[in-house]
Image (spheres, rainbow, N blue to C red):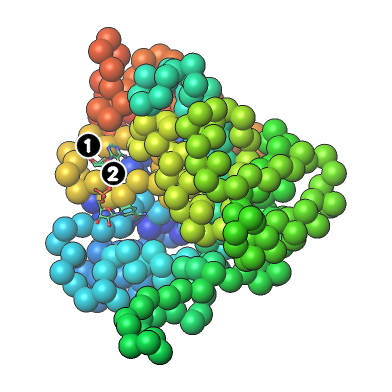
Amino acid sequence: MTMNIAVLPGDGIGPEIIKQALRVLDVLKNEGMDMTFTDAPLGGQAYDQYGHPYPEFTQKICRAADAVLLGAVGGPQYDNLDRPLRPERGLLGIRKDLGLFANLRPAVLYPELANASTLKPEVVAGLDIMIVRELTGDVYFGQPRGMRVNEEGEREGFNTMIYKESEVRRIAHVAFGIAMKRGKKLCSVDKANVLETTEFWKEIVIDVAKEYPEVELSHMYVDNAAMQLIRNPKQFDVMVTGNIFGDILSDEASMLTGSIGMLASASLNETKKGLYEPSHGSAPDIAGKNLANPIATVLSVAMMLRYTFDNEAAAVRIENAIKKVLAAGYRTGDIYEEGMKRVSCSEMGDQIVAAL
Ligand code: NAD
């Protein structure tokens, strides 16, 4: 089966990091893996070419693809555009268009980079957590919402926290499925003592758990989860939670690792089609200087092979190549430490390709 991959380099450092990720995929292609790449613009790049951050041209290519590989979008030159035309709207647009409801955010800290974290090395070295965040529901999208003058004549703002059973079931299945591929431990995060929406969430997760008897399920209130992530993050394997809690906890977890240039992400729909991208932005401050760390993007490629194309062996091979390069002391500026070998974005790509 041909793997059809849409490639959206985007803005800022996007094209530089995507170039290195494609070199890694080229190694696999040259060995016989059947894949095609189709380029399309997103974000500011798309606005410049088509006047829209997610134009029809890109929509068609992304809908037809099995997976989408994205660099990053955004830049100061677009900050004054009308909201619907801003690069970030391109991201919201593609997520909605492809029905990407499951956001996977790994927080992995390689032992070699333990000093990059603000926490003590013994607390974080070897950390390997996967946060599964529901991406299309919850208080971010619930209706009614808005601002109004209430019956007492006072202004107020309001949103609705809401989850349908089908929405909780499908994200729970994704999370249990991932736990099965990893350490078989799943922690569902809620605020069931205060919020009915999440009491309901917990009830459904417990029901879905019956289909995954091998997975050890636990539950934690979100405030405690935020504390435990700092106190003893290695207790977690996979965490699953709703949109707003996941937004906050996944950022918190990513900072345990201290190095934004290392963090991959995936957003999946019901057919396992996925959008794969680094967790960081377009880093306009270092764009075009060959300084960016391409590892988050290369790790996103590993996730693509694992979650959309079910090729665990190829994913592990890429992850091992990165471990090898780090163990050999190669570092881009963002993760550089005294005594290491400082390399550019393209030189980091050279090393990863060589290690493969
Ligand atoms: P950012 O992640 O782009 O940059 C934050 C800091 O981290 C900067 O100092 C940057 O140089 C550094 N950094 C980020 N990625 C790096 C890498 N791979 N290697 C080395 N250093 C790296 O966040 P920001 O500065 O808040 O946002 C810049 C632009 O990116 C904005 O327009 C924002 O809207 C956009 N953005 C896009 C996405 C996305 O595409 N998914 C996500 C976040 C922000």
User: Mark 2 highlights which residue?
Assistant: 16
Residue 271 picture location, percent across and down: 65, 63
The residue sitting at the top extreme is 339
Question: Can residue 301 be seen?
Answer: no
Given residues 299 and 171, the one toward you in this image is 171
Name the kind of residue labelled 2 in the image.
Answer: Glu
Q: Position of residue 159 (x, y in %)?
A: 46, 74
Task: Measure the C-alpha gap from mark 1 to mark 2.
Answer: 7 Å
Q: Residue at x 61, y 30 (%)?
A: 235
For disc 1, the neighbor class at 10 Å (few under 14, some 14 to 19, many from 20) is some
State the count of labels: 2
Q: Is residue 330 above or below residue 210?
A: above
Q: Is residue 23 left or right of residue 341?
A: right
Instruction: Say whether marks 1 and 2 touch (CB < 8 Å).
Output: yes
Q: Which mark is residue 187?
A: none
At label 1, the amino acid type is Asn
- The residue that disc 1 covers is 290
Rendered position, 145 above or below 130: below
